[in-house]
Amino acid sequence: MTQPLSETFERYALGLARKESLPPEPHAEMANRRKAKLLRLLKAHGIKGWPERGTLFTRQLSDGCKPCLSGEASHLSVTTLCNRDCFFCFNPKPRKDVLSVHGREVSSLDEAILGLKEMGVKSVGIGGGEPLLFPQRVFEIIKALKKNLGSDLWIDLYTNGERLTLNILKELKAAGVSGLRIDLAAREYDAEPVRLAREVFNDVEIEMPAIPEDKKVVRDIMSYLDELGVKQLILHELFASAANIDSLKKRGYHASSSGSPDFRLTWSPVAKSEETVYGHLLYALIHQFKMSVYYCSCRTQDWIAENALKNQKLGTVPH
C-alpha cells in the first residue's frame, strides 16, 4: 500500500504543522510549581502511569488505549465532515468526505483493510469528523473489519453523540463495535447520549480535550458519569495546531511551558490544560470513582508516535 502522504498523514504521524505559535505562558514558573504540587498529591493518592511521559490514570487503561500506547493501533477516518464546529478541532478546512487510514487517504474500503492488515493492528478507532453522518457506511466498515482482521479486533467508535439513537446503537453493537467514545466537550457537556448508550453498550467512554475554563462543569458531571457506569473518562491535553490556532488566540490561550524541546510532534500544548487535568485526576481519586480517569498528554502522543515509528522501522507499518 503506497500512496503520497496526505495532510491527514502528516497530522497523525508527524504532528500538526503550524505556521505560528500561541504567545508564551505568563508566570510559567508559578504554573509549574502548582503542577508539581498537584503531581505530588496525585502520587500520594496512588496515581498510576508514567508521570515523566504525561500518561496518568486512576484505575486502569482502556482496552483500546493499550495497543495505541504500544504503537499497535490505528485510526480509520470515515469522513472529516461534521455537524459541529468546535473551536479546538484539528481537522483542516474545508472539510472533505474522504476515507483515510492512519492518515493515508484511500480510494476504497478494500484498500483500507489491506493497509490495516499490513500494520498488524490490534485496535482500530473509527472516527471523523462525525462518522454517524453516514451510519450505513459505518456499519459496512465495522463488519468488514471484523471479517478480515478477526473477531478479536477491538473497535472504538468516536462520536459527538448527536446522531445516536437506540436503533443505531443496537446496529453498532450487532456489527461488532467494542466500545463507544463520546466527546462531551463537542456538545456543551450534555450527557444524554451517554445515558442512552449505556442502555446498549457496556463499554462507554468519554474522550475529550481538557478545556481550562470548563473545569467546574466537568467536575459537576463526573459523579453522574460514574453513576451511569462510564468505564473511562479520557482527557486530552488541549493543543494548538495550524487548523485551530486562530480560534485559540481569540479565546486568549497561551502556549504551555511544559512542551519538551525535543518533541517530534509539532503541535503546542496549551497552558493550564495539564493543570486542569491534574485537578480532575485528584478529584476522581479523592472521591474513589469506579470510573477510571486517564490523562493523554501531548507528551503521551509523542511517545505513541515514537512507538509507531519504531514499528514502521521494523516493517510492521506500511511505508
Image (tube, rainbow, N blue to C red):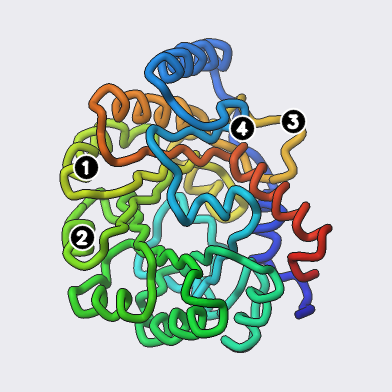
Q: Is the C-beta separation of discs 1 and 2 under 8 Å?
A: no
What is the x, y in percent for residue 69?
A: 59, 48
Q: Earlier along the polypeptide chain: callout 4 or callout 1?
A: 4
- Mark 2 nearby-residue class (10 Å; few <14, some 14–19, many ≥20): some
Q: Secondary structure at mark 2?
A: loop
Amino acid type, callout 1: Asp
Q: Height in image: 231 above or below 193?
A: above
In this figure, which residue is indicated by the disc labeled 3? Answer: 261
Marks 1/2: CA–CA distance: 12 Å
On the rendered structure, is 114 left or right of 92?
right
What is the x, y in percent for residue 276?
A: 40, 29
Marks 3/4: CA–CA distance: 14 Å
Amino acid type, callout 4: Arg
Marks 2/4: CA–CA distance: 32 Å
In this figure, which residue is indicated by the disc labeled 2? Answer: 198
Instruction: Please state which of residues 203 and 80 is positioned toward the viewer in this rendering.
Output: 203
In this figure, which residue is indicated by the disc labeled 1? Answer: 226
Task: Classify residue 161 by image quadrant.
Answer: bottom left
Marks 3/1: CA–CA distance: 37 Å
What is the x, y in percent for residue 254?
A: 53, 31
Give the quadrant of the C terminus: bottom right
- Mark 4 nearby-residue class (10 Å; few <14, some 14–19, many ≥20): some
Q: Earlier along the polypeptide chain: callout 3 or callout 4?
A: 4
Q: Can the viewer see residue 52?
A: yes
Amino acid type, callout 2: Arg
